[in-house]
Every structure is written in structure tokens, then in C-alpha cells.
Image (tube, helix red, strand yellow):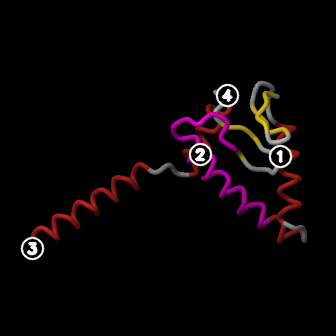
Amino acid sequence: MSFKHVFKSLLFILILGASLNAQAMTLQQAMEKLSSYKEQGFVGEKTNGFLGVVIPQKGAKEIVQLINKARFEQYQKMANENNYSVQEIEDLAGKKSIQKTRPGHYIEVNGQWVKK
């Protein structure tokens, strides 16, 4: 393989990587889209304090992953600051998020998605 061919291949990989990174959603974008995705029934609240994908839809998994990562980090911080386990914080957050979920949005009950 010639140097020119290797260089072109590397250049292509770099350009592809940059374009994929540019398309990646930020946490802020995920937060902005969350309400709409909940309203459409694509995403719901789980009893463990995290989001789940109700109906697979473009972007739903990424929104769930980004927000759940941020939630987990916050739960860890709260647990450390208040001398609780992360599990206790998750359980409390799950109860609170289920209570705050609007009617018509999905919540997980006994492992099944149901409209509140």
C-alpha cells in the first residue's frame, strides 16, 4: 500500500469521525427533546429513577443514555453528600419522578410500560 493511499484512508477516517461527532447529541439537546419524546410516548420514567425507551424511535435511546448518565452522576453526588447509598437515592428519585409524571405519559410498573 502506498503512502498516498494510506494518507487518503486516514484522512477519510478523520473526516468520518469528525462528522459522526458533529452529529452526536449533547446533554442539553437531549434535555430539550425529552418533553416531546415523553409526550409522544417514546420515553418514560422508571421506578429506579432512570428513563427508559418505551417505543424505539430515532434519538430515543441516545436521549435516555445521556440523561441517565447525568442522573446517575447526580445520584452519586447526592449519596456521597448525604451519607446514603446510591441505591437509596435511586429509589427516592424513582418515587418522585413517578409522582411528577404527567397523566398520559408512560411509567414503568412491575416491568411493564403503562400510561399514568
Q: Considering only vertical position in the picture, is 25 above or below 98?
A: below
Q: CA distance from mark 1 to mark 4?
A: 18 Å
Q: Secondary structure at mark 4?
A: helix
Residue topped by disc 2: 63
Residue type pointed to by label 3: Ser
Residue 15: mark: none
Figure quadrant of residue 78 = bottom right
Q: Considering only vertical position in the picture, is 100 above or below 18?
A: above
Q: Residues within 10 Å of mark 1 (few under 14, many from 20)?
A: many
Q: Main secondary structure of the magenta part?
A: helix
Q: Position of residue 84 (x, y in %)?
A: 90, 67
Name the front one of labels 1 and 2.
Answer: 1
Q: Residues within 10 Å of mark 2 (few under 14, many from 20)?
A: many
Q: Give the mark nearer the N terminus: 4 vs 3.
A: 3
In contact (CB < 8 Å): disc 4 and disc 3: no
In contact (CB < 8 Å): disc 4 and disc 2: no
Q: Position of residue 60 (x, y in %)?
A: 58, 40
Q: CA distance from mark 4 to mark 3?
A: 55 Å
Residue topped by disc 1: 47
Q: CA distance from mark 1 to mark 2?
A: 18 Å
Residue topped by disc 3: 2
Closest to the observer, 85 or 100? 85
**Residue 15 within the segment the image draws in magenta:** no
Is residue 9 shown left or right of residue 29? Answer: left
